[in-house]
Amino acid sequence: MKHFALLTSLAFTPLFAKPPIPTPPEVPVLGEIEPWLFKKILNGKDVEGSLAKTYKDPDFQKLIKKHSLRLFGGPMLSSVTDKSVVVWLRTPQPETLQLTVKDASAKTVASISAKTSIVNDLTVKIAVNGLSPLTGYTYTLADSQGEIPIGNAKFRTAPTKDQKATIRIAFGGGSRYNHPKEYIWNTIANQDPDIFLFLGDNLYQDDPEHRNLQRVYYYRRQLRPEYQQLTASTAIYAIWDDHDFGKNDCAGGLDPFKPDWKVPVWKVFKENWANPGFGNGSDYPGCWFKFSHGDIDFFMTDGRYYRDFKKGTMLGPVQKQWLLESLKASTATFKVIASGTLWTETADKGGKDSWWGVREEREEILSLIDTENIGGVLLLSADRHRTDVYQIKRPNGYTIYEFETSKLTNNHTHGTKEQALFSYNKGNFFGTLDFELGIKNPTVTFRCITIEGEKVYELPLKRSQLQRD
């Protein structure tokens, strides 16, 4: 009852655009730690409140001792190449961690120690190099008390660009923390993806002025064992959308440093993800970046930080130039461009919160694909609480396919779209893309999979379909 009373009082403070969905008190670990997080950090007076500022609290020390809690987030894999991987970790207090990586014969190939940082909210990113392409590895973690138990501690490196391989990508958006739906992370992990792409609305924070709230929402998700099951074995990459950058349908504007909350929100984002890049660094912050996995190039875009529809831009000039130049330079068989919002001209709200609201900039990108004959382009998006497949037909190019899905854990549903090739909104779900690389006519197959692991739609495409004649 104390837990409920605390949540009730919090829910009616002006801090929340949406009150948090509580974790039942009987849930192991988080059920007891969450009330402390709410009381000491989320509802505290310090808008920059964090675990790093609060971990010495006696009540918290009792909790971590009671539950033998030695990690407060992670492991989370990211930046996986054919030779390397990055492992992100958070501890409940400053700690030196030892990461040991072994190959299939149990031979140690790397052993690296690093200390979690107060400056980065008790996190650390450990880079492992010198690995072999398309090879499976296991790993262990240890601290001053000895080995830390971890489930699903394994990964596979990427293939080289010329290597024959099957690569599975899972993706989605719309994942407000929601206790009854958190088992979706187990469902996704059971698909054994190489990569998972978070496409925005990853957490419904909706208040850029309170970084304490944002951090607590991250902590809750990272403490879920189901989430760890996914992140410990799958390369994770993330961009934001409105609900985890600012507020509903927000537009940050062209100034990199105004409003004042933009850079602090960016800092929280960087603390909690291990992407290979975050915009153009401190001179031009953001969450955009690119990476390659075998013969696939991924372009992860930021449609919020610099958005200004009155000035006709989703990306801002620096990011747009980066995207155009990167696309033109790509020689990968497949190019995946990810966005937090829809690309299609039949987007909801008449385009007021999608690429259709910046038609000239959208056309500039699509025209480059046409004129430069950039084959193999796929568009990903999120935001609308359903799964859609769209065909964007180009008069001077090939038909470009867009795959949208954004109801990982949300309860709220958006209606289906009759203009879509496929539109589905029952329950919760995610998307996958299976790439067959290194064959004569490489293929990609999209699937929509429910929270229960049921396949409800499948669309195979050959690389030859994604090319102008």
Image (tube, grey):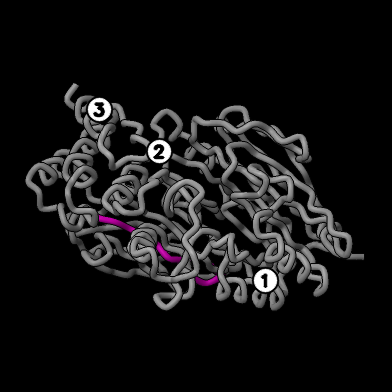
Q: Amino acid at mark 1?
A: Lys
- How crowded pointer 3 is (Cα within 10 Å; few <14, some 14-19, many 20+) is rated as few
User: What x and y, as percent, mark residue 398?
Assistant: 85, 60
Which is more toward the observer, 277 or 318?
318
User: Residue at image x 39%, y 59%?
Assistant: 269
Residue 121 relative to residue 176: left or right: left
Could you tell which of marks 3 and 1 lies nearer the N-terminus? 3
Which is more toward the observer, 291 or 50?
50
User: Residue at image x 20%, y 30%?
Assistant: 6
Are the two marked residues, 1 and 2, in contact with CB atoms closer than 8 angstroms?
Answer: no
Tell me the mark number nearer the camera, choosing from 1 and 2: 2
The residue pinned by badge 2 equals 177
Q: Find numbered disc 2 in the image and state the secondary structure of the residue it sits on.
A: loop
Magenta stretch encompasses residue 85: yes
**Rendered image: mark on residue 56:** none
Residue 358 relative to residue 203: left or right: right
The residue pinned by badge 1 equals 161
User: Residue at image x 49%, y 36%?
Assistant: 409
Label 3, label 2: how many angstroms apart (C-alpha)? Answer: 17 Å
Q: Find numbered disc 3 in the image and state the secondary structure of the residue it sits on.
A: helix
- How crowded pointer 2 is (Cα within 10 Å; few <14, some 14-19, many 20+) is rated as many
Could you tell which of marks 3 and 2 lies nearer the N-terminus? 3
**Rendered image: mark on residue 8:** 3
Residue 75 is drawn in which quadrant?
bottom left
Tell me the mark number nearer the camera, choosing from 3 and 1: 3
